[in-house]
Image (tube, coloured by chain):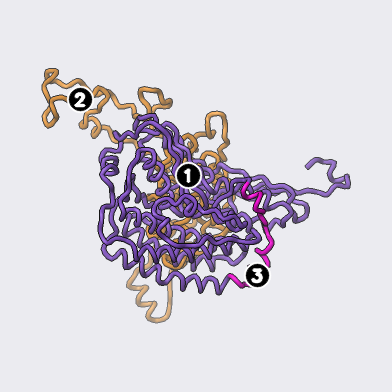
Chain colours: A orange, B purple
Amino acid sequence: MAIDEGLNNELQKRGIFVTTLNDLYNWGRRSSIWPLQFGLACCAIEMIATACAKYDIARFGAELFRPSPRQADLMIVAGTVTKKMAPMVVRLYNQMPEPKYVISMGACAISGGPFRDGYNVLKGIDRYIPVDVHIPGCPPRPEALLDGLIKLQKKIDSQKIDQMDGYREEKSCEYPVPQYGKKGLEPRHNPDFFTPRLDWPEKNTKDNLRMPNYKPAPAPARAAGSPLPGQAATGGPSEQGVAPAQLAAQPPASEQGQ
Amino acid sequence: MSDTAVHSQEPQLLEVSIGPQHPSTHGVFRMNVVLDGETIVKLKPVMGYLHRNHEQLAENMSYLASMPYTDRLDYICSMTNNFAYAMAVEKLAGIDVPERAQYIRVLMAELTRLINHTLLVGFLLNDLGAFFTPTLYAFREREKILDFFEATAGSRMMCNYFRFGGVKADLPAGGMEQVKEIVKNYSRFLDEFERLLTSNEILRSRCQNVGILSKELAVNASITGPILRASGVNYDIRKVDKYSIYDRFEFKVPLGKVGDVYDRYYVRILEMRESIKILQQLLKQMPEKGEILSAKGAAAAKSPRMWKPPAGDAYGRIESPKGELGFYLVSDGSPKPYRYHVRPPSFINITILEDMCLGQKVADAIVILGSVDIVLGEVDR
């Protein structure tokens, strides 16, 4: 689809501008992303700071924060998503018109962050809605949010109108809203785009609490009591420990697949 | 409402749920409002959308490990949260704080008060309909203070700067000049801010005699902070408790007369001016050099997971920008607190919301909520 650059330059000198409909359309879309004015926690303050004078998100065309999801293109999930709030976030996402994008801002929105161990915190919003850009940090600096926005613009630039999900009729872009049941949120994640790690145990028991199902390390082949190289004589290898070589041999399954 | 309401002579009531996603709720806060026409007859706050198990997490980790979590309670003023928590643990373990560290602490606390009140005024005007213009000015000033915080603590918002028995690091080179510059220019900024706002007719007509909170009700509901002082009660923990080194500074406690939204706005402007006075005195009195961490505090910071305070309980409180922020700790002599309780000013101040909103118009409820100054990280914890 790309136009020959030399020819294009030659034409531009003569006052003729040639482009593709795809490029023109994407140029328009990426240059005026309207985010949803929607803050959850600490990161929302940095999001407002990004919109204010010093960092000025308007330089990238995304300054028009819309309070209504019907008018927004981009949802910046800025902050901790709790189990009480997650249904609202998904409902807001469903109400946004296509094409829509999601930036998950901050450690909490990505994975639960520092509050991951809590009973009421969702371990990442990408369990329920597809996320385009993850911005790590607690909270991310405004520059990081701007960088994430530029990454999103690059993604929009690379999309083709005729192949995008939002423009195809057979593809529904509404996702089921989780409900708060007896054991937390149900369903626990959206199987369409989120696959939990297979090597993580289904149920946390006392022994394997938050530990992957690694096989126990083979017993060292040396005589008991003799120290390992580079290890103090007193501290032997722990029973629960995992040999480093075995860890390297097992590549960790990716936590998120989109 | 029941089906018969249509046919009866009773006024038809409309129930509106405002939030949790709403441009004017400060965070994920929801109000269930029952309206008669435009007048509020009933208001029920719904909380818990940001409940992050702060206390439960803190009871499962060492004392020092909770320090960064306190930053995220009231995420606009992380320094004062650190201050209150550090004071509670110091009281529990009997740790002393060196002279210079005390001055740095008060410096940080007062700068945080400036940030909080400036932002609050910006957000309050946002709620009134002056969309984002006062907020732009507020954030411009906030960035100057945050630059200083970043140079000192290493982080803009989540400073995690205080330690038991002192602070984490000394001020950076050129830090004092930075503070002097901020303090010098801040009152000029406040003048500019006030010229735009204080005598503004729209602001006056929207705020005066709206959401009046009486003295008796405020005291009975244990309201603290600028809201209480706007109702005319002279209660400032900096004066009452004289914690840290606040007895060395001369400052007044601004009081309101009516207790409406306008008084709450103006008390905060005056408090900022008093904070500038404190900072000016502080910059003159502050020792040039000195320890920033006492010996006992250094021992606690060296191996935080093994550090055990003696069994007992302690309550440390400060006048945070929003009111009385207190931490109640019960220790059983183990490295983890047995009970860790936060007394958040926002949560207790928001309980009075219905009494202030009854009989007002629905648009005023947003303004009254804005004047209470809540941060949901602190309300829900």
Q: CA distance from mark 3 to mark 2?
A: 73 Å
Q: Amino acid at mark 3?
A: Ile
Task: Please tell me which of labels 3 and 1 falls first in the chain.
Answer: 3
Q: Nearer the viewer, mark 1 or mark 2?
A: 1
* Front-most of residues A82 and A168: A82
Range of residues picked out in magenta: B198-219
Badge 3 density bin: few <14, some 14–19, many ≥20, Cα 10 Å? few
Whether residue A128 is visible here, answered yes or no, is no
Give the left or right position of residue B271, taking residue A155 as reference: right
Quickly name the residue at label 1.
B326
Quickly name the residue at label 3.
B202
Residue B5: image location, x then y, percent: 84, 44
Quickly name the residue at label 2.
A237
Q: Amino acid at mark 1?
A: Gly
Q: Does dot 1 land on a helix, a strand or a loop?
A: strand
Give the left or right position of residue B361, taking residue B232 as reference: right
Q: Nearer the viewer, mark 3 or mark 1?
A: 1
Quadrant where the N terminus of chain A lies?
Answer: bottom left
Give the left or right position of residue B68, taking residue B360 as reference: left
Label 3 with label 2: CB-CB less than 8 Å = no
Quick check: do tags 3 and 2 share a chain?
no
User: Which chain does tag 2 point to?
Assistant: A
Badge 2 density bin: few <14, some 14–19, many ≥20, Cα 10 Å? some
Give the answer, above or below, for where A229 lies relative to B344.
Answer: above
* Front-most of residues A205 and A165: A205
Q: Residue at x 37, y 54 (%)?
A: B105
* Front-most of residues B55 and A37: B55
Q: Is B375 in the magenta? A: no
